[in-house]
Image (cartoon, rainbow, N blue to C red):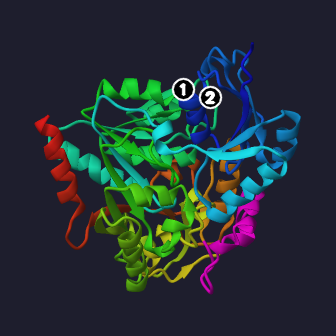
Amino acid sequence: MATIRERILILGAAGRDFHNFNVFFRTNPKYEVVGFTATQIPKIEGRQYPSILSGSLYPKGLPIWPEDELEKIVKEQKVDRCILSYSDMNNQTVMNLAHRVMSTGADFGLLGPEHTWIKSKKPVIAVVAVRTGCGKSQTSRYVAQLLRNAGLTPVAVRHPMPYGNLAEQAVQRFASYDDLEKHKVTIEEREEYEMHISKGTVVYAGVDYAAILEQAEKEADVIIWDGGNNDFPFYAPDFWITIADPFRAGHEELYYPGSVNFRRADVIVINKVNTASKAQVDKVLANAARLNPRAKVVLGVSEVTVDKPELVRGKAVLCIDDGPTLTHGEMPFGAGKIACDKYGARQIVDPRPYATGSLRAVVEKWKHLEWAGQGLTLPAMGYYAEQLADLKASIEAVPCDTVLVATPIDLSRLLGLSKPTATCTYELVDGEKPWLRELVNAWIATIKKH
């Protein structure tokens, strides 16, 4: 008698969804995955999860539909259960999805860390966050330097961002700027890879994280899981660091799955304490004591610097900041505003009247970007060629003295900007004791013994 397989629809955004399929569903005969839905990232639906990655149970690959059609898909495909497999969602949004699914008659579910992570042969230190834009990247770079100082070779494995050809992106290795061109990465990917590469850290990313780990282990003494959004790690961590953002105090229990990271962490880093208020920091401290009393808590300083401060001081400045942080990350400003305040800009120019094409739709959608009396920043959106062109046209149209690029890539070189450009960078430095380096170095000492 044939076994009836439970029909599964995976709700995703080109990342966690593919990983959950690969490690939990791909070879599991109890389930029949009918496909994926896609959201958050523009123009990623309508693709196919390729047969070369989908395994013997799915020889034709799997379709990827827009999440907007969720109810229709569930009914047409006779779905039994939908599995939520993307991140950085407030609790109400998660429940709204559950309501949509259950109103069709299907079940709704989530997969936890233990069911979806892979165990490495090498030590793993995970750097994840409560929300996107908390400071994971600067913390990963900080950790990588501590490992190098101890004579170890770190390799960073980055949370997936496969927005192109999935078969070609199964395993990606980035060790040089030429690799960025080779893999035709988006602005979002450049933001994560360039600074690691500049400091000599090899980065892996892609779609198949078991295959990625096998390659990374060949050249790493320690794997750094460099998280994305506020997702929990794909690899079983031996040391778990979670970054919290006091500018979004309280989000550590209001957003999925960042609250999992906050509650599971060995170390909680409350970042940006040099620019947040005491009340904001105190709220996160109180939540850490209540939700994860066993964790060590560190106060981190995000030090913002500009390479050409004379182009900011007394000038009318257009700020360009990290796209995901400002959009679904819901931050009303980025490092650009901090730098303009620090270096005495005369004015932060409002780009909204000059935004064109897809960028106009972005600034109209995300109303929280406006700061009263100060204009707003322009998100560095570049998921596809047309969006890059819209970004360049929008920047060139804004009347300003300086373009301040407050996202860690050479945007002027990438876009060929004609305007004077300054670059803002931000690095994690130690605040009050206990210092993060003391806790990381203590862990390094334990792994070097073995």
Q: Is residue 56 above or below residue 232?
A: above
Query: Quick check: marks 2 and 1 in contact, CB under 8 Å?
Result: yes
Instruction: Return the residue nearer the eye: 410 or 440.
Output: 440
Q: Which mark is residue 166?
A: 2
Q: Amino acid at mark 2?
A: Leu
Answer whether residue 232 is magenta in the image: no
Q: Residue furthest left?
A: 449
Residue 376 appears in view: yes
What SS does tag 1 mark?
loop
The amino acid type, in three-letter code, at marker 1 is Ala
Point out residue 142 in the picture as x, y percentages from the top left corner: 29, 54
Residue at x 57%, y 49% (from the top left corner): 416
Q: Which residues are magenta?
A: 351-376
Task: Classify residue 446 by image quadrant.
Answer: top left
Residue picked out by circle 1 = 170
User: To which quarter of the image does residue 254 belong?
Assistant: bottom right
Instruction: Verify whether residue 355 appears in magenta.
Output: yes
Query: In the structure shown, which secondary structural element does the residue marked by tag 2 occupy?
Result: loop
In the picture, the quarter occupied by the N terminus is top right
User: In the image, 227: left or right of 328?
Assistant: left
152 to the left or right of 350: left
Residue at 34% x, 54% y is 241
Does residue 345 appear left or right of residue 162 in this picture?
left
Q: Nearer the viewer, residue 385 or 167?
A: 167
